[in-house]
Image (cartoon, rainbow, N blue to C red):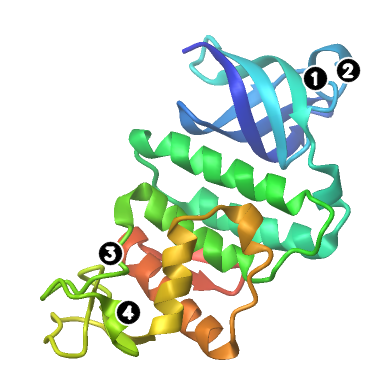
Amino acid sequence: MEFSEKVLVLRVGTFREADCWVRFFSPTHGLLTAFAFGGRRSRKRFCGCLDQLSLVHFRVSQGRQEYLCLQEGTLINGFGELKRDLKKLGMVSNCVRFFESLPFSPDGYAPAHELLLETLEALDEERPGSWFIPLMFRAKMAFSQGYQPDLQRCRQCGGPLDAHHRAVFAVQEGGLYCLRCPSGGGAKISTSRETLSLLHGLARSGPREWADWVPSAKVREECVRLVDAFVQCHLGLTCEGNRFVRS
């Protein structure tokens, strides 16, 4: 395998003093690890490219023992503003840990790469980042991987949910029921109209817009419960502190 494209560098480590391993995400090949032999000493081939959380154009080839080698790289964006802000760095680190834990299918590589890149670009802007962004990132990532529920109509009768002050989210079914219809089996979460409106807006927006969202305490609490349950059920990941583990 040999290719050349823009990728997102997620992690970098050093071995044998001058050599590096680089974990990156490609929009066409997914999550990969490759070696940059002599990378710490070669400014010509890898100037500024071997830092985590960077957008880089890499030329990648396959070695004799079937491992991937980085031949050269060009830095596209180092996200300097983001890296100078510890609060934002903490947010994006949470997003990346979640991202690395996901089992992507090939048709999900490109939308996943696009969403992570948009999140990095949004947090790199000179304005405060919302602590809500990591949660929104998890929900949007689930939506982008084919798990987006219908947030406007009842799964049973097809009626508009905004006609009711609350609805019932059936986690296993990945759908919502109005209060007049019996929901399916499994876990259920009572959800307000305001929370559904926020999640519907999330499905139609990007990370740059999330920074301005200031939901009420009730909506924040409901979003946390709903998104965590949805991600656990459909993506198989549970949040434990700052880690995401397979459930």
| Image depth: mark 2 or mark 4 in front | 4
Identify the mark at residue 137; answer none if there is no mark.
none
Label 3: element kind: loop
Quadrant the C terminus occupies: bottom left
Query: Within 10 Å of the Cα at label 4, are there few (<14), some (14-19), or many (20+) other Cα atoms?
Result: some
Give me the C-alpha separation between circle 2 and circle 3: 50 Å
Q: Quadrant of residue 74?
A: top right
Q: For the residue marked with disc 4, what is the amino acid?
A: Asp
Tell me which numbered mark, 1 or 3, is placed earlier along the sequence: 1
Query: Within 10 Å of the Cα at label 2, are there few (<14), some (14-19), or many (20+) other Cα atoms?
Result: few
Label 2: element kind: helix
Identify the mark at residue 43; answer none if there is no mark.
2
Identify the mark at residue 46; answer none if there is no mark.
1
Answer yes or no: is residue 173 visible. Answer: yes
| Image depth: mark 1 or mark 3 in front | 3
Query: Within 10 Å of the Cα at label 1, are there few (<14), some (14-19), or many (20+) other Cα atoms?
Result: many
Give me the C-alpha separation between circle 2 and circle 4: 58 Å
Give me the C-alpha separation between circle 1 and circle 4: 53 Å
Q: For the residue marked with disc 1, what is the amino acid?
A: Phe
Tell me which numbered mark, 3 or 4, is placed earlier along the sequence: 3
Query: What x and y, as percent, mark residue 182?
Result: 11, 87
Give me the C-alpha separation between circle 2 and circle 1: 5 Å
Q: Quadrant of residue 80?
A: top right
Q: Pointers 2 and 1 in contact (CB under 8 A)?
A: yes
Q: For the residue marked with disc 2, what is the amino acid?
A: Arg
Q: Say left or right for 225 vs 158.
A: right
Residue reaching furthest to the front: 163
230 lies above or below 57: below
Q: Quadrant of residue 19?
A: top right
Which residue is tagged 3? 150
Q: Residue at x 34, y 35 (%)?
A: 107
Answer yes or no: is residue 245 visible. Answer: no
